[in-house]
């Protein structure tokens, strides 16, 4: 689960981390009051969407010459003008895709005197099975560009979970970021506290880009991007309250109600599979035969008829879907349950696109019998390769 920058900063501030003063703006008329609540005289008006690259983004409605989604303002009047200009319009960045995202929240933040911009993130480094800091002196840039052009400028420091962030780890991070004086002293508290927040709140990503050294020599978190492990949200009702469903795909929200693992993609072949590994293999083989999957959908090992019906309805609700591939290898998940769910869903919502079904495993003969006697226009497949060929041919034909 993702949250907005201002929410992330409020959370990090509760741990005692150095962030600027700021006020969220939830309507176009709140700009003046928000600015007057801050010291000034410099303010930054920031679009709040779940996507990066906001500063370089462009608003669809304002033309190519308009300023981006992060704007420096030198007066309260300029803040008000920028808020009115940005609020409710559609911001397009590299991460939103061409459709962009509507800006329904803004964040007015006190300005900062920046001396240096650095990059810092925490993530789970699966190669070593530990939480790791990833840092670079090249802050404020796309970290992917830095990794491609100058990978030697990215340093990774994995943290021993039994020891936490040690003095030796702090020294490595200070040296990697070339921090000295007050900034290095700040690092002694900032780095362990960031790690503490990451672990205690079950984050999957904590990115600060940029982490700045101000002209007074102190550190400040100028930006913050935080994602949480969905599987641990039951432990954090305070985090769940931060969820902004307007930033999420409606189909993904519906899927979460049924505990379905669903991710919307950009293709035209809908997939319903049991097991994450098999679902990924199914998407791969669709791409191998020249088409693109419209979603990742894992119904899980113990899905009910109602759960399968909901999954099928979510797939068919996507107007981009031109064909559906059901690929089930029954173990705990029984093939007859899948068949009953598919039949129930089709009878309820209809079937307007080709449907290819591959069933194998527990109760496979019963599952095939249910589909065969349903009267539905279902194309059976012998194996995954056969299924992929048939659905791609049906969609392209």
Image: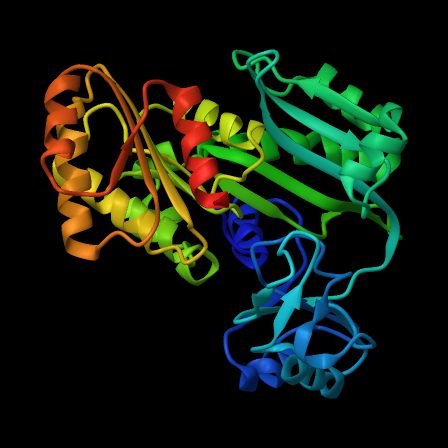
Q: Which quadrant is the N terminus positioned in? A: top left
The residue positioned 61% from the left and 63% from the top of the image is 100
Residue 233 pos. (x, y %): 35, 39
Above or below, 35 against 297 in this view is below
- Quadrant of the rendered structure where residue 160 is? top right
The residue positioned 67% from the left and 74% from the top of the image is 60
274 vs 132, left or right, is left
Residue 234 pos. (x, y %): 30, 38
Residue 174 pos. (x, y %): 81, 27
Residue 108 appearing in the image: no
Of residues 257 and 237, the one drawn nearer to the viewer in this rendering: 257
The residue positioned 78% from the left and 21% from the top of the image is 171
Of residues 344 and 253, the one drawn nearer to the viewer in this rendering: 344
The residue positioned 77% from the left and 38% from the top of the image is 143
Disc tally is 0
Residue 380 pos. (x, y %): 28, 28
């Amino acid at each position: 689960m993702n949250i907005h920058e201002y929410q992330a900063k409020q959370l990090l501030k509760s741990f005692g981390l150095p962030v600027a003063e700021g006020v969220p703006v939830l309507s176009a008329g709140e700009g003046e009051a928000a600015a007057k609540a801050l010291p000034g005289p410099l303010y930054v008006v920031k679009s709040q969407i779940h996507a990066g690259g906001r500063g370089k983004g462009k608003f669809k409605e304002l033309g190519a010459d308009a300023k981006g989604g992060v704007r420096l303002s030198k007066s309260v009047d300029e803040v008000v003008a920028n808020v009115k200009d940005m609020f409710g319009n559609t911001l397009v960045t590299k991460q939103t895709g061409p459709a962009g995202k509507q800006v329904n929240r803004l964040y007015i933040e006190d300005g900062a005197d920046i001396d240096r911009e650095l990059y810092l993130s925490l993530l789970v480094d699966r190669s070593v099975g530990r939480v790791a800091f990833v840092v670079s002196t090249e802050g404020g840039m796309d970290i992917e560009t830095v990794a491609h052009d100058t990978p030697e400028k990215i340093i990774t420091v994995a943290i021993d979970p039994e020891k936490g962030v040690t003095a030796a780890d702090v020294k490595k991070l200070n040296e990697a970021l070339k921090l000295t004086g007050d900034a290095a002293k700040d690092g002694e508290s900032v780095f362990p506290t960031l790690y503490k927040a990451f672990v205690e709140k079950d984050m999957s990503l904590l990115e600060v880009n940029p982490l700045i050294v101000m002209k007074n020599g102190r550190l400040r978190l100028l930006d913050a991007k935080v994602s949480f492990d969905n599987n641990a949200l039951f432990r954090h009702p305070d985090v769940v309250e931060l969820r902004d469903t307007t930033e999420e795909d409606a189909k993904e929200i519906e899927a979460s109600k049924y505990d379905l693992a669903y991710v919307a993609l950009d293709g035209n072949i809908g997939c319903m599979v049991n097991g994450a590994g098999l679902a990924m293999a199914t998407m791969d083989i669709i791409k191998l035969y020249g088409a693109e999957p419209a979603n990742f959908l894992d119904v899980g090992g113990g899905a009910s008829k109602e759960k399968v019906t909901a999954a099928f309805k979510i797939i068919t609700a996507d107007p981009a879907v031109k064909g559906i591939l059901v690929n089930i290898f029954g173990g705990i998940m029984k093939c007859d349950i899948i068949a009953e769910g598919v039949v129930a869903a089709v009878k309820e919502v209809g079937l307007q696109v080709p449907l290819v079904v591959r069933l194998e495993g527990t109760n496979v003969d019963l599952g095939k019998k249910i589909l065969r006697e349903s009267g539905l226009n279902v194309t059976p497949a012998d194996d995954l390769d056969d299924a992929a060929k048939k659905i791609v041919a049906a969609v392209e034909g």
